[in-house]
Image: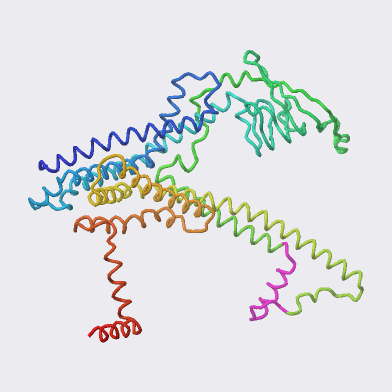
Amino acid sequence: MKIIDRYILKSYLTRLFSVFTICMFIFVIQTFWLFIDELAGKGLDILIILKFLVYYSPKLIPLVLPLSVLLASLMTYGTLSENYEFAAMKSTGISLQRALYSLVVFHVLLGIGTFYFSNHVIPYGELKSYNLRRNLAKLEPTLAIREGIFNEIGEINIKVKRKYGDNDRFLEDVIIHEYTPNQKNTIVIKAERGEMKNEPTDPNLKLVLYNGNRYEDIEPKKARERERIPHAKVSFETYEMNIDLSKFNQVDLEEENHKNTFRMKKIDQLKISIDTLQQNYGKDQEVFSENFGKKSAVTQIVKKEKSTSAQDSIPSDIFGFIETDQYWQKAQLMDEAISSVRIGLRNLTSKRGQFFAYQKLINLHKIELQKKYTLLFVSLLLFLIGASLGAIIRKGGLGLPLVLSVLIFLTYHYIGLFSTNAAEDNSISPFFASWLSTFILTPFAIILTRRASSDKGFVSISNFYYPLVEKIKALPFVKRKLQTNDSTRN
């Protein structure tokens, strides 16, 4: 390696390490504040909190590294231009492309290392951090209760519409399924609101419910009495329940019960999951289509008519099966038909939601797979953009380079964010959404590198002004006016 390559590489790596450390520290602090509600107030050891942050940190690398590369390259090449070191290089025959050579090789190797990191370290960190969060949630029941879904706490399964108040201890619209010793769900409690009360030294949680009903299915010993399906209903203004919290204090934080989310999988696992999900999705669609067609009498008539006729249109006498002149019988048949159509529409609406969720899961797997490949090129493209801008603006401090870096990075990040969000609901292709930011960066990087190599500015007004003036002068009425003015002067 030549002296000039060592000099540029040393200057760049020094800034890259400094910027990466600072940005990583900022993002980790932001992560800590993001999960402060799940970590604070549980008497956790500082080592547990640090362990969670360490496990979560690999997910931040795809955000921190591109920003660090962009800012470090802007500062490095901006400083070289500002101190006229590039002018000295060019006087000795060293072009900008030659000055970029060593760092281009470095970023190719960095992209390969980032790809390996995203395929092995990030899934492992996601596995550890996700399971640690789920285990930490068991230490505090109020955090284990999420709004709008059923949450299992001890011997009950509870669902609330909304949580509010200090530490989210007040509950609204409560539904509780209480397990019995035979592990059957025979007791259901519904209340307008509730409140969770517990003391630090009390092993039990007191759940107070207000204005509700308690329903219980009674299972008699005699089979004849079971046919009557006996049950009990009790209304209450205040109802107190004690939940044993001893299990919450004996949580194994190293337990890993969740291992199959799409963010925990490597490339080969993602490919297998995508193939399996797509096959199951196709089979579910075929089964539903076949079963839905069997339930429809009109569908059967259309199939029968098509099998005996070459026409593809619906038969005109499709309602010929109403073989009666009685008005009430026709009305009854039409009411049954309308009811059947409504049931079919409800089934279609329900199944459409299920298919949408299934397709979204497939798209999330595809997006995660493509993101691992895009990391191969992002660092190199952002380096070329940063280095070219640094050579053009000739500023190497933390002022203008920092502003430009943040603007470019936010543009790149939000384009990718909006496109992937659109791909989740199948609005655009997951492949195109994952690569959209890279497709936009590539021509931008090429144009900037060419302009920087030819000592051109970022935007040359003359390139727009003079061609526009020439086109205006070429217009017929403008041309006649100019000729008239010239003849008048002469």
Q: Nearer the viewer, residue 158 or 275?
A: 158
The rendered magenta stretch, by its main secondary structure, is classed as: helix
- In the image, farthest residue toward the front: 489
Give the residue at x 45% y 51%: 366
Depth check: 382 or 134 in front?
A: 382
Residue under the image location 31 percent in, 72 percent down:
468
Q: In the picture provided, is 431 more to the left or to the right than 195?
A: left
Give left or right: position of 79 versus 329: left
Taking the image as shown, residue 184 lies to the left or right of residue 144, namely right
Q: Quadrant of the C terminus?
A: bottom left
Percent coordinates x, y for residue 42 in the rendering: 55, 21
Is the image coloured rainbow, by chain, by secondary structure, or in one colour? rainbow
User: Which quadrant does the N terminus fall into?
Assistant: top left
Where does residue 228 sit, x and y in percent of width and height?
Answer: 88, 38
Residue 243 lies in the magenta-colored region: no
Numbered range of the magenta stretch: 295-315
Question: In the rendered view, would you say 456 is above or below 43?
Answer: below
Reply yes or no: does residue 313 show up in magenta: yes
Q: Quadrant of residue 289?
A: bottom right
- Note whether residue 103 is visible: yes
Q: Position of residue 427 (x, y in %)?
A: 52, 58
Residue farthest toward the top in the current orientation of the protein: 201
- Quarter location, residue 225: top right
User: How many marks overall?
Assistant: 0
Res. 70 visible in picture? no
x and y percent of residue 22 in the render?
34, 33
